[in-house]
Image (cartoon, rainbow, N blue to C red):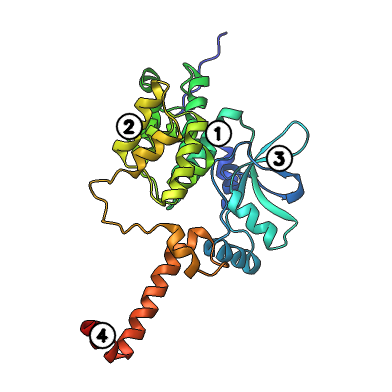
């Protein structure tokens, strides 16, 4: 006789009626293990930086006093080691605090599932650098493309028809165009990407620079160091067009960046050779401007203390 299908009426199972609260909780919560730190490997190409700042100091102190409150998430590897998915800062803080073991939630998951969890957990932080968004969005995008028509790791069957960048945009709160811009940053050389993280180059000019070859980008960076200024959006668009036509070189980059920008303040240019004799040899070239400003400030204070100096200058 064919067995009738069991109906799920949302009622408590018979065996569960005799479980206490602790047993019920243990059945729903993940099991936490003490894993030796020496067996934990970094997530491959982890895009988020572990910064040694004041927040890290506070986290280390908290772990020393109360232990690790929030376990990290690990993925078991075939060689018996573990790969960290979420909690790189906490793991580093435990190392600094001198712990040999770290509390961890160990989960079986695929590479793409690990990427998705890693990106989503780190993007909840209050401060995220452009480079961190760039590489995490790129990893998430590649994971979505590998999934193909799978919907178990995305949002719904409807979203699988969207572009992968549109899915990321919906999840992360950025526009699709903004997601694409951030991913373009992964084509920048490290020196220029650092300037973006430091807020010295805005996102859109940085995107235009990402279309230059790496050699051309290095030429731009050298010119930024020499003139102590960064190119405007319009200037980067011109560089990209010239590059696409195969004619961009160091001289052209210098000519473009020497042009006065519409919002640029007036500058006073002094030939370096004329002031070199007045500057101590211990002052490096890049600090010359700061030294001149300090010297003028000192001279101004001196003039204010010697009133007759102004009168003598007027009579001459």
What is the quadrant of the C terminus in the image? Answer: bottom left
Residue 164 in the image, given as x and y percentages of width and height: 41, 24
In the displayed structure, 153 sits above or below 205; it is above
Which residue is rendered at x = 25% and y = 85% of the image? 310
Residue 82, label in figure: 3
Q: In this view, does 292 lie to the left or right of 28?
A: left
- CB within 8 Å, label 4 to label 2: no
In the displayed structure, 171 sits above or below 37; it is above
Residue 223 in the image, given as x and y percentages of width and height: 45, 44
Mark 4 vs 2, N-terminal side: 2
- Closer to the eye: label 3 or 2: 2
Residue 165 in the image, given as x and y percentages of width and height: 39, 27
Q: Can residue 177 be seen in this view?
A: yes
Q: Real-space Cα distance between discs 4 and 1? A: 70 Å
Q: Real-space Cα distance between discs 4 and 2? A: 50 Å
Q: Which of 161 and 292 is in front in this view?
A: 292
Which residue is rendered at x = 63% and y = 39% of the image? 43
Residue 310, label in figure: 4
Q: Mark 2 points at which residue?
A: 237
Q: Real-space Cα distance between discs 3 and 1? A: 15 Å
Mark 4 vs 3, N-terminal side: 3
Q: How many C-alpha atoms fall within 10 Å of the one at disc 1: few (<14), some, or many (≥20)?
A: many
Q: Name the residue under label 1.
A: 115
């Amino acid at each position: 006789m064919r067995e009738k299908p069991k109906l799920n009426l949302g009622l408590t199972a018979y065996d569960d009626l005799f479980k206490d609260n602790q047993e019920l909780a243990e059945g729903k919560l993940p099991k936490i293990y003490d894993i030796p730190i020496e067996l934990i490997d970094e997530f491959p190409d982890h895009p988020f930086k572990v910064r040694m700042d004041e927040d890290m100091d506070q986290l280390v102190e908290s772990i020393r006093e109360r232990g690790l409150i929030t376990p990290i998430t690990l993925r078991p590897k075939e060689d018996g080691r573990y790969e960290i998915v979420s909690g790189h800062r906490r793991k580093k803080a435990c190392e600094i605090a001198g712990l040999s073991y770290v509390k961890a939630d160990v989960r079986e998951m695929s590479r793409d599932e690990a990427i998705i969890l890693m990106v989503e957990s780190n993007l909840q932080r209050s401060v995220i650098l452009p480079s961190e968004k760039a590489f995490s969005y790129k990893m998430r995008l590649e994971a979505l493309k590998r999934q193909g028509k799978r919907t178990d790791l995305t949002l719904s069957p409807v979203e699988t028809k969207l572009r992968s960048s549109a899915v990321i945009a919906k999840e992360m709160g950025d526009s699709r165009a903004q997601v694409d811009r951030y991913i373009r940053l992964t084509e920048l050389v490290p020196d220029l990407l650092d300037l973006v993280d430091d807020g010295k180059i805005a996102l859109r000019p940085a995107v235009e620079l990402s279309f230059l070859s790496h050699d051309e980008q290095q030429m731009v960076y050298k010119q930024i160091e020499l003139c102590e200024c960064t190119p405007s959006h319009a200037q980067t668009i011109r560089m990209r067009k010239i590059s696409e036509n195969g004619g961009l070189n160091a001289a052209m980059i210098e000519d473009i960046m020497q042009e006065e920008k519409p919002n640029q303040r007036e500058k006073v240019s002094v030939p370096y050779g004329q002031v070199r004799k007045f500057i101590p040899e211990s002052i490096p070239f890049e600090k010359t401007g700061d030294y001149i400003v300090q010297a003028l400030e000192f001279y101004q204070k001196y003039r204010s203390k010697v009133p007759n100096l102004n009168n003598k200058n007027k009579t001459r």
